[in-house]
């Protein structure tokens, strides 16, 4: 449960940060969006991997 909350918080911070940067600097929208997407996918994959590992231990 804690890992899911932490992953959700990190995803929320990535989203808020990328929206803010894109709002302040519209010229970097493409690279910032791509970077935030890649980071978000990695965080989500980490959360899934931890959840699967914990489920196997139970």
Image (cartoon, rainbow, N blue to C red):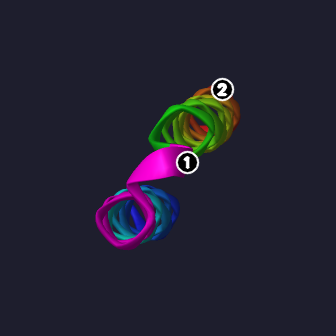
Q: Are marks 1 and 2 in contact (CB under 8 Å)?
A: no
The answer to which of marks 1 and 2 sits earlier in the sequence is 1
Residue 13 position (above or below residue 19): below
Rendered-image quadrant of the C terminus: top right
Q: Which residues are magenta?
A: 18-28
On the rendered structure, is 3 left or right of 43? left
Q: Position of residue 10 (x, y in %)?
A: 49, 66
Depth order, front residue of 27/15: 27
Q: Residue at x 39, y 53 (%)?
A: 26
Image height of 11 relative to 54, above or below: below
- Total numbered badges shown on the rendered structure: 2
On screen, residue 49 versus residue 40, left or right, reads right
Decide if residue 30 is on the left or right side of residue 45: left
Residue matched to label 2: 56
- Which quadrant holds the N terminus? bottom left
13 drawn magenta: no
Q: Which mark is residue 28?
A: 1
């Amino acid at each position: 449960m804690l890992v899911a909350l932490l992953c959700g918080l990190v995803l929320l911070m990535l989203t808020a940060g990328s929206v803010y940067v894109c709002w302040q600097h519209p010229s970097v929208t493409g690279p910032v969006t791509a970077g935030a997407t890649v980071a978000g996918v990695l965080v989500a994959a980490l959360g899934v991997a931890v959840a699967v590992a914990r489920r196997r231990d139970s």
